[in-house]
Image (cartoon, rainbow, N blue to C red):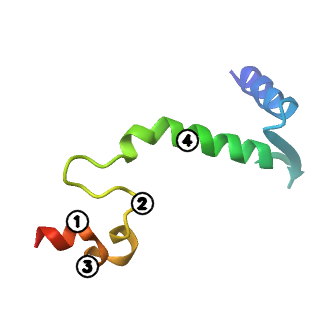
Amino acid sequence: SVESLEWHMEQLQVDNYLISQEMNGEIAYKLTDFGRKEAGQRFAGAFEGLQKAGHGECSADCDCQWEGHDSCQHHLHKH
């Protein structure tokens, strides 16, 4: 319900995750620095298992993700 959502948004402000401000006659919410850091940690934790490379695959932080397959030791050995 709307009341439940409003209560949760208020609690997130009380706990310093969010700040609110009025914009164009409506309330807008923004993460605080603390809220942004906490959200990042929770997101990373939730998807940690999916970010690991499978056997024979490059990880999400491998150079080949940005620089192409020629920069990756795994791909160089594969050819």
First reached walking from the N terminus: tag 1 or tag 4: 4
Q: Position of residue 42 (x, y in %)?
A: 59, 37
Numbered mark located on residue 43 in the image: 4
Please report contact status of discs 4 and 3: CB closer than 8 Å, yes or no: no
- Neighbour tally class for label 2: few under 14, some 14-19, many 20 plus, Cα within 10 Å: few
The residue to which callout 1 is attached is 74
Please report contact status of discs 3 and 1: CB closer than 8 Å, yes or no: no
> From mark 3 to mark 1, how far is it between C-alphas?
9 Å
> From mark 4 to mark 2, how far is it between C-alphas?
16 Å
> From mark 1 to mark 2, how far is it between C-alphas?
13 Å
- Neighbour tally class for label 4: few under 14, some 14-19, many 20 plus, Cα within 10 Å: few
Does dot 4 land on a helix, a strand or a loop?
A: helix
Task: Relative to 9, say whether 75 is above or below.
Answer: below
The residue to which callout 2 is attached is 61
Q: Amino acid at mark 4?
A: Phe
First reached walking from the N terminus: tag 1 or tag 2: 2
Compared across the picture, whether 42 is left or right of 7 comes to left
> From mark 1 to mark 4, how far is it between C-alphas?
28 Å
Numbered mark located on residue 70 in the image: 3
Residue 38 or residue 52, whichever sits in front = 52
Please report contact status of discs 1 and 4: CB closer than 8 Å, yes or no: no
Q: Amino acid at mark 2?
A: Asp
Q: Amino acid at mark 1?
A: His
Compared across the picture, whether 69 is left or right of 51 comes to left
Does dot 1 land on a helix, a strand or a loop?
A: helix
Q: Amino acid at mark 3?
A: Asp
- Neighbour tally class for label 1: few under 14, some 14-19, many 20 plus, Cα within 10 Å: some
Closer to viewer: mark 1 or mark 4: 1
Does dot 2 land on a helix, a strand or a loop?
A: loop
Closer to viewer: mark 4 or mark 2: 2
Please report contact status of discs 4 and 2: CB closer than 8 Å, yes or no: no
